[in-house]
Image (tube, rainbow, N blue to C red):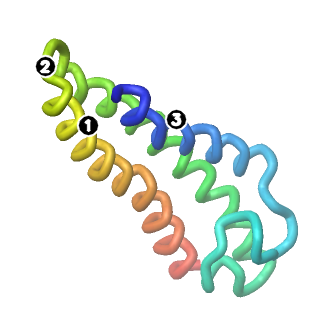
Amino acid sequence: MLCMVALVPFLMIIFGAVFVKFPPEDINAFYGYRTRNSMRNQGNWDFAQRYWGRCALYTGCVGFVPAVLCMLPCLGKPVDTVGSWGAVVCVVLGAVVIGLPVFLTERKLRRR
């Protein structure tokens, strides 16, 4: 269950690093940080890809620690307890780790 809880922060670290190093160059409907604000013009697109990547990388790194720490109280507990606790941690941590970069990027795009 620890692997499942740490999966979302780990993937955010990977995607963040990819978007920082190799952001999609052209506005497209298939790959990249795609919102109405980011696709408005090429300047917004370029900014949003790199900014979201940095935010995702940071929140993934920061979110990895609580993912591991939240599962420590489950050591030696029954499988049902570990599963229930892990599910709650996955949902809450996933919402924060995925939602925070989107919120920050959209806020920054609106202020541009």
Tag 1, which secondary structure? Answer: helix
Answer with mark 1 or mark 3, whichever residue precedes in sequence: 3
Tell me the number on the disc at residue 77.
Answer: 2
Q: Nearer the viewer, mark 2 or mark 3?
A: 2
Tag 2, which secondary structure? Answer: loop
Answer with mark 2 or mark 3, whichever residue precedes in sequence: 3
4 or 99, which is in the foreground?
4
* Residue drawn at point x = 41 percent, y = 50 percent: 97
Tag 3, which secondary structure? Answer: helix
| Cα distance in 3D space between marks 2 and 3 | 25 Å
Q: Nearer the viewer, mark 1 or mark 3?
A: 1
Dot 1 crowding, Cα within 10 Å, few <14, some 14–19, many 20+: many
The answer to whether residue 62 is left or right of residue 92 is right
Amino acid residing under circle 2: Lys
Q: Evaluate if marks 1 and 2 touch, with contact meaning CB atoms under 8 Å apart.
A: no
42 or 36, which is in the foreground?
36
**91 to 73, vertically: above or below:** below
* Residue drawn at point x = 24 percent, y = 26 percent: 71
Quickly name the residue at label 1.
86
Residue 74 x/y as whole percent: 17, 22
Residue 7 x/y as whole percent: 47, 36
Amino acid residing under circle 1: Gly
User: Extreme right residue here?
Assistant: 26
Quickly name the residue at label 3.
10
* Residue drawn at point x = 21 percent, y = 20 percent: 72
Answer with mark 1 or mark 2, whichever residue precedes in sequence: 2
